[in-house]
Image (cartoon, helix red, strand yellow):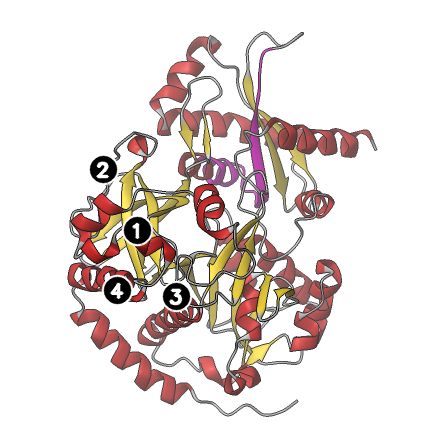
């Protein structure tokens, strides 16, 4: 094993300088300047000509000139006609990369432009997470070992000469500076492996002898890796030298206890991030539950629309100058990759304004209101965590859908498919379902009203499935891998039927 030079002292100096700059940063002025720079940079594009950017001097002008758009509209109007060679369409020059994203629900494939400016924005955001970690852990030796990013395959598709598409992690790996490669794992030949199960096993085995200091990825996949490494070691922490675990993509409440057990005996600190294929939105600068700090100076201009107004003809568009705490907002991005007033699809709630810190509460499509209960993703996640705690169980993953009245079922209900780390008994599953019901009633007035006397909605049904169930389901759907997440709330009838079919098949074996 090649020795690694510990460059943590150098990064500690750089991190201290960055934290001083962040402490002095005015978020409102920074966001105003960001928008002006983005508009000026895009002057020569078709989008700028269509929207009169020569008349846009500030936030108010921008809102009048540029309406909100979702991916489908941006794709149809500006990206698809010239795909894969986007030249001066919504951003100047040729777009060299597209991040392929499946979203989090029905799995529709999206191609998100990734420019050189956006790659640098992502790097700055990642460094901010490191800066906060080093400030909180002055004794850290983060750069005395390897950083393991559990992402998808780094194999990219060449859509046209000089234009590539693939997982965002693959784009990051392909453009990683040469000097940084000695600090990262897996190596290029392993990162290219497309078979997720083969790749995960090789990563687990080949990382055993390495000083893994940092680990990042989606919680559900990280758990599989850590538990496999722990099994290979025959006990003790999977990575004894682990200093920092970065997680994001899903709420962490239901996973925290298992990670704490796996990482016991290590100096590891866990930090949450809010990444998206469209841009790196925020990262934790404080402790769990204290909100993620918005990245206001990374080439992204943010707007926030009250969720209730998102589909209104003229929704109110807030920015950091006038956001309010406690309000459920849909996130809107304008970025250095040529996304303009783009509805990201996530919902957030601010807990601080100066600097802006937020909690991710779900997806704009992550809502269950089959019977008028109006549940949002955050309520579903919190109820699942409360139910798991009530029976002292670890939940690996879950999904819920609605069962409507039909022959033999007079009143509709929710059906939950829950994967437990260890199989619970029938009594424990019943208690889990009961606690789900009471937690949702406490969190949501409409749910409580519809459950009153069982008139509008019957009690939830819980199907306990064994460890590995959701990985098998995702594999069957072609969605196995570090960039894919299990959909929590399923409103798509075909997707729900596919999940239920697999549950019934497994039960019948």
SS of the residue under disc 2: loop
Residue drawn at 50 percent across, 92 percent down: 5
Q: Which of marks 1 and 3 is in front?
A: 3
Q: Could you say which disc has been placed on residue 92 in the image? A: 3
Residue bearing the label numbered 1 = 358
Of 98 and 54, nearer the camera is 54
Name which of mark 2 and mark 4 comes first in the sequence. Answer: 4
- Label 4 or label 1, whichever lies nearer to me, is 4
Front of the two marks 2 and 4: 4
Residue 40's disc number: 4
Q: Is residue 400 above or below residue 171?
A: above
| Residue drawn at the location 53% of the way across and 46% of the way down | 103
Q: In this view, does 219 lie above or below 398?
A: below
Look at the numbered disc 4 and give the secondary structure of its residue. helix
Which mark is drawn over residue 316? 2
Tell me, yes or no, whether the two marked residues, 3 and 4, touch with CB atoms within 8 Å.
no
The Cα atoms of the two marked residues, 3 and 2, are separated by: 29 Å
Q: Position of residue 375 (x, y in %)?
A: 42, 28
Mark-to-mark CA distance, 1 and 3: 32 Å
């Amino acid at each position: 094993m090649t020795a690694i030079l510990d460059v943590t002292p150098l990064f500690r100096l750089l991190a201290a300088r960055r934290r001083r700059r962040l402490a002095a940063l005015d978020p409102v002025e920074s966001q105003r300047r960001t928008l002006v720079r983005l508009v000026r940079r895009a002057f020569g594009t078709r989008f700028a000509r269509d929207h009169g950017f020569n008349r846009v001097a500030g936030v108010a002008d921008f809102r009048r000139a540029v309406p909100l758009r979702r991916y489908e509209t941006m794709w149809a109007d500006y990206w698809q006609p010239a795909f894969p060679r986007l030249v001066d369409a919504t951003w100047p020059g040729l777009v060299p990369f597209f991040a392929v994203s499946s979203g989090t629900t029905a799995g529709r494939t999206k191609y998100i432009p990734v420019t050189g400016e956006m790659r640098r924005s992502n790097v700055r955001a990642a460094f901010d997470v490191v800066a906060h970690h080093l400030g909180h852990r002055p004794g850290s030796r983060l750069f005395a070992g390897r950083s393991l990013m559990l992402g998808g395959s780094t194999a990219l598709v060449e859509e046209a000469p000089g234009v590539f598409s693939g997982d965002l992690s693959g784009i990051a790996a392909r453009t990683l500076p040469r000097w940084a490669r000695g600090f990262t794992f897996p190596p290029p030949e392993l990162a290219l492996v497309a078979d997720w199960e083969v790749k995960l096993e090789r990563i687990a085995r080949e990382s055993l002898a390495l000083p893994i200091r940092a680990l990042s990825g989606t919680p559900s996949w990280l758990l599989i890796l850590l538990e496999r490494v722990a099994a290979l070691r025959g006990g003790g922490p999977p990575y004894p030298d682990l200093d920092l675990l970065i997680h994001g993509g899903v709420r962490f409440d239901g996973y925290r206890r298992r990670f704490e057990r796996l990482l016991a005996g290590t100096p590891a600190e866990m930090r949450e991030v809010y990444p998206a294929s469209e841009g790196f939105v925020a990262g934790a600068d404080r402790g769990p539950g204290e909100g993620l700090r918005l990245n206001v100076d990374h080439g992204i201009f943010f707007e926030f629309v009250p969720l209730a107004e998102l589909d209104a003809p003229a929704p109110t568009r807030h920015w950091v100058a006038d956001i309010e705490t406690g309000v459920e907002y849909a996130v809107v991005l304008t970025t250095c990759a040529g996304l303009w007033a783009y509805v990201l699809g996530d919902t957030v709630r601010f807990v601080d304004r100066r600097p802006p810190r937020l909690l991710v509460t779900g997806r704009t499509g992550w809502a269950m209101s089959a019977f008028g209960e109006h549940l949002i993703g955050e309520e579903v996640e919190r109820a699942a965590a409360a139910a798991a705690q009530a029976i002292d169980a670890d939940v690996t993953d879950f999904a819920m859908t609605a069962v409507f009245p039909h022959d033999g079922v007079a009143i509709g209900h929710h059906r939950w498919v829950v994967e437990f780390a260890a199989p619970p008994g029938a009594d424990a599953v019943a208690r889990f379902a009961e606690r789900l019901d009471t937690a949702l009633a406490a969190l949501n007035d409409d749910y409580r009203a519809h459950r009153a006397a069982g008139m509008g909605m019957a009690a939830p049904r819980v199907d306990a499935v064994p460890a590995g169930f959701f990985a098998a389901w995702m594999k069957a759907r072609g969605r196995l891998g570090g960039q894919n997440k299990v959909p929590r709330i399923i409103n798509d009838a075909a997707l729900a039927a596919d999940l239920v079919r697999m549950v019934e098949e497994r039960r019948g074996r």
